[in-house]
Image (spheres, helix red, strand yellow):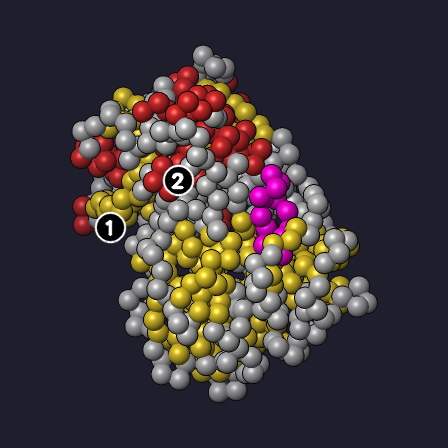
Amino acid sequence: MPGPDDAADVDVLEELANLPTLAHPTAAPDGREVAVYYDISGRNELHVLDVESGELRQWSDGEVPRNARWFIEWGADCDRVYFHNDEGGNEQNDVYAMTREGSVESVVEMGGQIAIGDVGDDGRTLLFAASRDGQMNAYRHDLETGETTKLTEYDRAVGGLTLSPDCERFAYATNEADDYNNRDVYVADIDGSNPRNLEIGDVGAEAAPSDWGPDGDRLLVSDNTPDLGRIGVYDLAADEVTWLGDGEYEEQPAAFLPDGRRVIGTRMREAVTVPIVYDLETGEGREFDLPEGVAGFGMGGSPVLDDDRVLLTHTTPTTRSELLAYDLSTDEAETLIEAEYGPFEPDDFADAEYLTVDSDGVPATRQAAVEHDPSEELEIGALFYDAGVRPSPLIVNPHGGPRHRDSKRFDLYTQVLVSRGFSVLQVNYRGSTGRGRSFVRALHDDWGGAEQGDVATAAEHVIGTHDWIDDDRVVVFGGSYGGYSAYWQLVQYPDLYDAGIAWIGLTDLDDMFENTMPHFRTELMEKYLGTPGENPDLYRERSPVTHVENLNAPLLIVHGVNDRRVPVSQARIFREALAESGFQEGPDGDFEYRELGEEGHASSDRQQKLRTFRLLDEFLERRIGTDAEESRIEVGD
């Protein structure tokens, strides 16, 4: 770490942006190697780790995406890795393969988005979902002949694709019910014929497959019929499912272990996520022995190294993500890739305090003017990061999704804000995950309603209980659905905030419905709001642009031009409405506007992150004033 004399020469934002990040680790079929995205070289590249020797070898040289959003998969021969690639972050992926020698070949190219589902042990079957014909449906690509076959034809999105060990069948999830909230597990022959709904759980609940048992006769599945998500093993011959656990916490399955008698998954409680293992013979389960934080098995690929060892990442609010091999026979973890801290140390970062607040969806400042029912109160969880500055400005940072949650993991954007002297509040409003189906559905038909009241109520609570919070310097900042929340908080609770930053956020729900990708239209918009034709008043009333005249604080609008989830038209519509309403644009005006080239729905690329950090910092300095010199994150302190 640089000494005190060097501190003035260190750019903290650049150092934070340059902290190496690893993503999507996946074990090779023989368990000897791990493929992982890693930007230790300065750019995201595909690396392969030899588990025994610890040697980390870079396979790619600029051929993989700069943004590491999409996961990777090994081929059956352990000599190639399949990856997604798009243009400038637009997520209209095609599939490519990289060999051990570094050569790259195109595997599947088609219009729309592709998401790899599974790669078969037979060496020739690639299963994926694609939106080529509109909705996401299942396809099979023959790696030997190059032939691609469409396997399903559903009106709603198909996902969760997983192949049987013999590659003769595949499992998937979709919804054919009238209830938009429903999701069922299906098994079909590999040519798409004989699809069978396993009818797991109640209609209106959500079930999904996760993995096939090594014998090919069982499926590892999830379901939330009892409210909290649960893990089950479905016996395909007996047509029955065995549920695991006592139902105390939300749980999600990950994989069978090779012996076929144990399965692994994750458990969510409050703001932590911990891996669990269940013995199928006894039904007993136990948590992994890890420090409190967030641990998981990643998305895509396999986390299984051998009979007893599994691959996982682990992080806490002050410790960055590291790659571990966890031995279930000894409950010991071996670090495979250590976290990098650059000039920082874990003690330099702000820890997260978990707190709760009771909310009926109407903040105190609105209760006299808005009808509300105190009997509808819910306990809302939140994370609070103290920057150590007195008095401290506050940034309220609602998460995206909305089906997501903030948790006790290392959050780079939070630590950037703390480095500028801002304490940060993150709110797991109604609709967030980890609390069960009913908590998620409290947001249905009320998008922009009580969940926004939860955010404002939590902000009022923190301001009221921490007298060192400067209530004249309160900012709302969010991305994606958090960007929608930022817009909405500013136009619905204008007296609460002194500035706002809306990043890749929604402003006009009609336009969003028309221009987002088809599976976001059905799985997000229709599920939460119905269609504009069914609920035109709701779409209009819950669009921030409808209330643009209420803006009463400086606003920074930031949006990637290649965003296909939340199209850039959302930002442009709000900008035009502001101008038409007489608001002035510019560094000294009522709002500022920035479109980000070569970027879609956010990015993990170092330079693109730094660009965003600079935009945030410069806006906050102009409009609120930063206290970086007093912050706990000070290189060389």
Image quadrant where residue 447 sits: top left
Binning the other alpha carbons within 10 Å of mark 2 as few (below 14), some (14 to 19) or many (20 upward) gives some
The segment highlighted magenta reads 36-49
Cα distance in 3D space between marks 1 and 2: 38 Å
Q: Which one is nearer the viewer's eye here, 167 or 347?
A: 347
Q: At 50% from the left edge and 80% from the top edge, which residue is drawn?
A: 260
Q: Provide the secondary structure element on which disc 2 rests.
A: loop
Q: Would residue 398 be found to the left or right of residue 390 on screen?
A: right
The answer to whether residue 247 is above or below residue 336 is below
The answer to whether residue 493 is seen in the rendering is no
The answer to whether residue 103 is above or below residue 216 is above
Q: Position of residue 484 (x, y in %)?
A: 44, 37
In the picture, the disc for residue 378 is 1
The answer to whether residue 356 is seen in the rendering is yes
Q: Amino acid at mark 1?
A: Leu
Dot placed on the residue nearer the N-terminal end, 1 or 2: 2
Q: At 61% from the left edge and 54% from the top edge, which residue is drawn?
A: 56
Q: Amino acid at mark 2?
A: Glu
The answer to whether residue 72 is above or below residue 603 is below
Q: Which one is nearer the viewer's eye here, 522 or 467?
A: 467
Magenta region includes residue 289:
no
Q: Position of residue 105 (x, y in %)?
A: 77, 54
* Residue holding disc 2: 345
Binning the other alpha carbons within 10 Å of mark 1 as few (below 14), some (14 to 19) or many (20 upward) gives some
Q: Position of residue 16 (x, y in %)?
A: 47, 35
Q: Which one is nearer the viewer's eye here, 36 or 471?
A: 36
